[in-house]
Image (cartoon, rainbow, N blue to C red):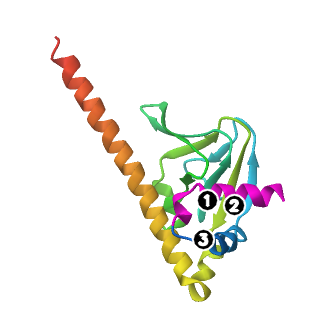
Amino acid sequence: MVTNELVITALRNSTLTEELRDSEIELLASLITVRNYKAGDFILQVGDTELKDSLLILGSGDVEATAATNGEHMTLHMLQMGDLAGIIGFVGGNVMQISATIVAKTDSKVLVLERSHFESLLNSQPAIVYYVMRGIVRHVHGIVRRMNTQSVEMSNYIHRTHGRY
């Protein structure tokens, strides 16, 4: 039952379930599988289609999202328990446009919610689907806010540094 406890704990730490009751979180947890990754394993890579329709939720471990720019990998974000990855594919976007790579930095457990399993709730539990999708939007909004803040900080740094020359 350690796996089920991990799933429930990770879901409770995620924006996905902020509006769900305990029974709804347990129902969502029943749709999830857990994958184990060793340090150095790629979880998602550019062009990878194995998990293209799945939402990934970090259960445990250290996982890094990187992007390749000018041939170098730059860290975008270190995921925390409950953080999401694979959002674009999960919501039906074109996975070929994804440019981030997700890699396990330590042994990690990742919760996998397949879109087809999630969509099975549309007729029987539409409120859960609605609230989870709101949670995804909140998560994406948080990413955009963080990136905007970093962009402003970088711009301010460049302007301060440039003014010294």
Measure how far apart labels 3 and 2 are at the Cα level. 19 Å
The N terminus, quarter of image: bottom right
Residue identifier under label 2: 8
Residue 150 at what x, y percent from top left?
A: 34, 37
Whether 124 is drawn above or below 56: the answer is below
> Is residue 20 on the magenta stretch?
no
Residue found at x 82% / y 55%: 2
Kind of element beneath mark 2: helix
Residue found at x 79% / y 57%: 3
The magenta segment: 1-18
> What label does residue 115 carry, if any?
3
Measure how far apart labels 1 and 3 are at the Cα level. 20 Å
Residue identifier under label 1: 12
Q: Are marks 2 and 1 in contact (CB under 8 Å)?
A: yes
Residue 53: image quadrant is: bottom right
Q: Earlier in the sequence, mark 3 or mark 2?
A: 2
